[in-house]
Image (tube, coloured by chain):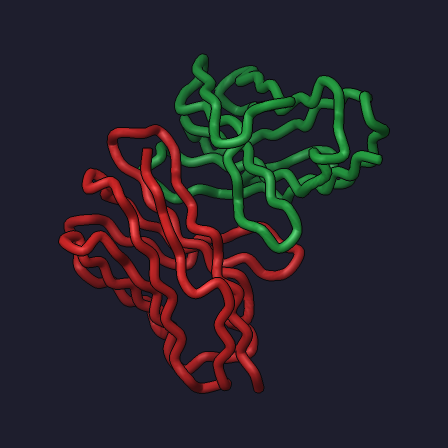
Amino acid sequence: GENVEQHPSTLSVQEGDSAVIKCTYSDSASNYFPWYKQELGKRPQLIIDIRSNVGEKKDQRIAVTLNKTAKHFSLHITETQPEDSAVYFCAASSFNFNKFYFGSGTKLNVKP
Amino acid sequence: NAGVTQTPKFQVLRTGQSMTLQCAQDMNHNSMYWYRQDPGMGLRLIYYSASEGTTDKGEVPNGYNVSRLNKREFSLRLESAAPSQTSVYFCASSASHLYEQYFGPGTRLTVT
């Protein structure tokens, strides 16, 4: 099956700085890469996703980049705010398997 | 649209007791999933159903059974609860594994 690795496990930044979270995957057939945000005590919610036919996607302060050759994708958050503090999960899926493979999560702490 | 609903929200069981966690979605999604999330940990897939009438094991299926009752409902059963099954259980649904997953609010289960 697929193997998704996520780094770092924890990330602490100062408010206003940028944060970058990286994920690698093993299955070259993977073609859908969502990112989820989970606030404390809440359910995971999709914040952005990208498909393999696109190299980059932006939504306001959030962007995701995909490098298919190197099999890695990254979440970029600019101008971080305290409300960005949460756990972020990357995931990957492909036509080969009818399920998602999640990374282990990154706990982001934005210090005011 | 209620999205994905789960019952109960909280449950305490004694070792050896059985119970069923209920999940329903009103988005006409084909795929449904059960995850468990231990404190400070990531999401681990227990079972999933790619379409009505099919179910498959995920990463940690031991001690659990599932039923895809119809397109809307996907239940998770613990036949003989063990303390190791203390966790938060999330149900999720998606149109397919290549589209956004929507998560339910979770069930916090404690087994004593």
Name the residue at 18% across, 56% down: A70
B63 or B52: nearer the viewer: B63
- Image-based side of B107 in relation to A2, left or right: right
- Image-based side of A3 in relation to B18, left or right: left
The spot of residue B17 in percent (x, y) is: 81, 22
Question: Which quadrant of the figure has residue B76?
Answer: top right
Name the residue at 52% across, 39% down: B44
Question: Which quadrant of the figure has residue A94?
Answer: top left
B93 to A46, vertically: above or below: above
The spot of residue B102 in percent (x, y) is: 48, 43
The spot of residue B60 in percent (x, y) is: 54, 30
B21 to A61, vertically: above or below: above
Chain A on-screen colour: red
- Image-based side of A27 in relation to B52, left or right: left
The spot of residue A22 in percent (x, y) is: 34, 62
Name the residue at 74% across, 38% down: B109
Name the residue at 79% across, 34% down: B111
B107 to A88, vertically: above or below: above
B16 or B76: nearer the viewer: B16
Specify the chain shown as green. Answer: B
Q: Quadrant of the C terminus of chain B?
A: top right
Q: Quadrant of the N terminus of chain B?
A: top right
